[in-house]
Structures are given as structure tokens and as C-alpha cells.
Amino acid sequence: MWTYIKSQLLAECQFSLVAADLVINSLRHSSQKQYASYLKRFFDFLNGKPLHTCNEKDLINYIEHLYSSGLGYSVCNTARSAVSTMFDIIFKTPIGQDRHVSRLLKGIFESRPALPRHAQIWDTDVLVRLLDYDSDKVDLIKLSRKVVTLLVVLSCQRVSAIHSIMIDDVFWGDDHVTVKITSLLKQSRKGFHQAPLTFKKYSNSNLCPYYQLKLYLEKTKELRGGIRYVWITTTLPTKRAQKQTVANWIRFCLREAGLADFTPHSLRAAAASKAISKNVNVDAILMAGGWSGTSVFARFYNLPIRNVNPVADAIL
């Protein structure tokens, strides 16, 4: 799909091959992957109609087609973004911004809304209690699950950030460990990249990120060979653990803690919400998690902690 768009840039805009690649790479790989299926559906819907003859009406008809097939607002909105982005790249006309397209999406939202999956977030105390055990003699899979989960919840980071850590970017001090994030993250943008993560020593070694990470690296030293990424698979042949594998480690811990209805990404909101409840400065939380401002943070991450009812507390 993106090969076709590249060919259009070469033909319609007379770009060089390098320039065409760079324009397409302005979209993150995850966005390219997500948009590809919706663009393929759009071309199937056009049924051979030349792309340069399409306009807002074709996009409206395509979105209506998706809606009529039973799909909801979230899918329709992503399809709108995919098609609009393609037209913006090739023809400099982001047709998804047309007011009738916007009205159509608003109507779909009213009919089939995409509401947040959870209005509340779980209390990190539940997970911390689960992880508070001696890990010196546990097997590698259990240690891997514990250390990854601990680092994600204590750092307020996405799973992808912790997954990207390389051994060469881990620096040990006497009472702390500093982890540099050298990979491009979702929150990376012009003028901003995630600051190094610093974890200090804590008296409880069972929950100390300094001790647990060091233990993990010691136990995997002979297994990793030339693998420079921190996380490795627990079965032979040993290789770098994929992001989905790391997420599954966290998902296992959530199930063990009775939180099976939450995803690994929920650790980010749980950690931030817990910090807010403990009166941690908001600016410090935004910096720790890489949020650019308070609006997205307040809307999606600063959630009331489940089973806490301030009204009942005030009364009783």
C-alpha cells in the first residue's frame, strides 16, 4: 500500500526516491501499519475509480459503508484519518477535514459512541503487594515478569519505552541506576525526548528496581550472548524479547493481581493517578511520563482510583 503511495509521489509530485521515502516516514511505523488496512479497504471500495478523481463525497460514502457494515466510531474515525492523510501526502488536500465529513463522524459518535473502557483505574497497591516476594531463587520467566512490571509501573512509561532499553544505556551508581532512552518513542517530538529514567535504591530489596534489574542482568548474562537489549526470551534459542512478549509478561502479573480486565498500558495511568493521590507535583509527573501538557494527561491518565469513594469517605 505504501509502495503505491510512494509511486504516486514520484509520478504526481515528481519527488525523488529519497524525498518520497522521507515524506512517508513522516508517519510513525505504527501509524503506517494501522492505516494500511483502511487504505486497502478504501481502494477496494473505489473498485477501480482513479484516485485523482476522488473527493470528499467518496470518503463520506466509504465511511458510511463501514458504518453500515456494523463498525463504530473508533474504526470510522481511523479510516477517515488514513484516507485524509493519504490525500494530504499526494494531492495536498486533506479531505478528512471537510465539514461534512466532520459532521458525519459526529453523527456516528452519537449513534455508536466510543466511550472509555474504564472510568476508574486500579490501585497500584494491589500490584505492589503481588510483587513483594523474594526473587533470588525464582525461575527466569517469573523474574522477567516481575522486573518488567516493576519498571513500567515505577517509571510511568509505556511498555515500548521499557522494551527499548539497551544494556549500554544502563548506568549504575552507588545508590541509583540511570536508564537512558535512546530509541524514538511515541511521545518523542521536535524539541523533546524522554529524559533518562532514574531509579534509586530502596530498603525493601523485593521491590527495589535497582536490585531487581541488577539481579535480572546477572541471571541472564550467560544466556544473552551478543544480545545488547535488556530483555531476552526465556526459552531457547535465546533472542531479544519482542514487545508483545514483554507486554504478555505484564499481562500475566495483572491477571495474578485480579486485574485481568486491564491492559499493560493501564500501568501508566495507574502510576500517574496514584502519584496524584499522594500529592506529587503535576509537573514532575508530566516530566516523568513524557506528557507534553495537562490536557491529554487529565483526560486519559488522571483517573479516580477504583474502590475509592470520596463522598462516602467524607460522610463516614
Image (spheres, rainbow, N blue to C red):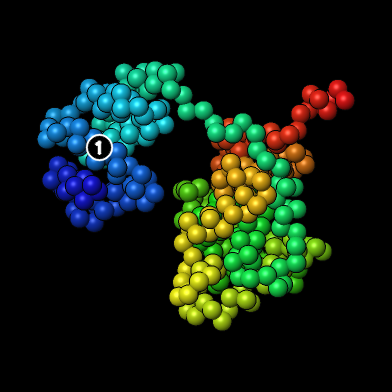
Q: Is residue 166 left or right of residue 102?
A: right
- Which is more toward the observer, 213 or 183? 213
- Percent of width and height locating residue 297: 59, 37
Residue at 45 percent across and 75 percent down: it is: 237
Quadrant position of the C terminus in the picture: top right
**Residue shown at 33%/31% (left/top)?**
80
Residue named by callout 1:
41
Circle 1: residue type: Arg
Residue 14: percent from left, percent from top: 15, 47
Residue 209 in view (yes/no): yes
**Residue 229 visible in the displayed image:** no
Tell me the crowding category of disc 1: few under 14, some 14 to 19, or many 20 or more residues within 10 angstroms, Cα based: some
**Residue 96 placed where, x, y %?**
31, 28
Give the structural element (helix, strand or loop) at label 1.
helix
> Is 66 rendered above or below residue 100?
below
Q: Is residue 237 left or right of residue 197?
A: left
In this view, 95 is above or below 25: above
Q: Give the answer, above or below, for where 211 lies relative to 120.
A: below
Pick the front one: 292 or 104: 104
- Residue drawn where x is 24% and y is 56% of the image: 18
Name the residue at 65% across, 34% down. Answer: 120
Quarter of the image where one finds residue 306: top right
**Left/right of residue 2 with respect to residue 106 in the rendered view:** left
